[in-house]
Amino acid sequence: MTPPCKPDVLDCLVIGGGPAGLTAALYLARYKRSVTVFDAGRSRAEWIPKSHNYPGFPSGISGRELLLLLRKQSSSYSISLINARVDGLDRNGEFFEARFAGGTARARTVLLATGIVDVEPAIEGHDEAVHLGLIRYCPVCDGFEAADKRIGVYGAGSGAVHKAKFLRSYSREVALVPSADDALDEHDLRASGIKLVCAGSGLRIEQRGIVISCSEGDVAVDVLYPALGCKAGSILATRLGARSHDTGCLDVDAHQQTTVPGIYAAGDVVSDLHQIAVGTGHAAIAATHIHKTLPPNPR
């Protein structure tokens, strides 16, 4: 494994190797700053079969392709990419110290691009269904691609209702399938053109669609949007006192700095608008402020 500490104290330690983390690293490297990226793998972007929502790719681009391009671009600079999970983050005097399976790394600043983890429905073949576009998580990203299809929203609470209403912009056939007993306003749903079906007792993939088993009979949809919640990867910062919202997303200022000086955050771990373009924008803002606040580095 390439030693992470060249020099002994990095200008910035980036935790997360998705689009936001890699973009931040590129900016910092171009500012002639020493930077290491820790990538634990399984970036949420890898789930995207093909995005038509990211500017500059009129024919669309898969999440994996985009990450490969970003990694290729990163390899053109002095960016150390370590495939490891950061297990702990501490403040040691004026520096931050990250612990991982291969040792420790010290840095003057830290940028968290640790994203979120979606709560997945219990369905055999889930990962393959995502790559086939049968299960989707982000209607802002790909509601357009689900236009005029039979859409199912599987979840409970206001989050599921809001997601179903959002998707009515794209299809007349939107069904809300409660994942648990929940008091829902059936009149409001009907007025919005949303069909309410009984709580699903099981999900299965069948003939390039998703079938929800209900007591009244099976309900088939072309695409299923789970609305079961998610968990933000903010714990490394909150353990050091960083403030977070009710959703677990980190509270940041206009420069993407958390309430702990020197710790920045970008992407889904900050914003409820889970978009690659939003995350890369955060990263550019954070990296530029980090560069400006670090000691000068004249050549």
Image: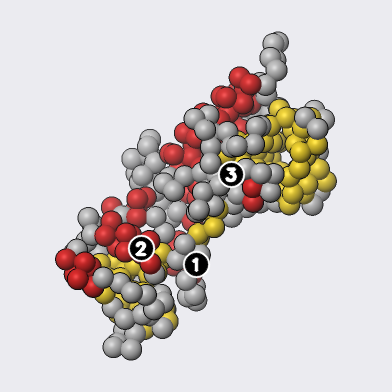
Picture residue at 39% right of the left edge, 41% below the top: 54
Residue 96's x, y, as percent?
Answer: 75, 36
Q: Position of residue 278 (x, y in %)?
A: 44, 39
Which comes sooner in the sequence, label 3 or label 1? 1
Residue 265: x and y in percent read 57, 39
Which of marks 2 and 3 precedes in the sequence? 2
Element marked by disc 1: loop
User: N-terminal of the two: label 1 or label 2?
Assistant: 1
Q: Is residue 111 above or below residue 299?
A: below
x, y percent for residue 274: 44, 48
Q: Is residue 68 visible?
A: no
- Residues at discs 1 and 2 in contact (Cβ within 8 Å): no
Q: Residues within 10 Å of mark 3 (few under 14, many from 20)?
A: some
Q: Which residue is denoted by mark 1 in the rendering?
A: 120
Q: Amino acid at mark 3?
A: Arg
| Label 2 residue SS | helix
Q: According to the image, label 3 marks what residue?
A: 243
Q: Nearer the viewer, residue 25 or 193?
A: 193
Q: Nearer the viewer, mark 1 or mark 2?
A: 2
Residue type, label 1: Glu
Image check: 156 left or right of 239? left
Q: Nearer the viewer, residue 111 or 254?
A: 254
The vertical placement of 157 against 55, above or below, is below
**Mark 2: which amino acid?**
Ser
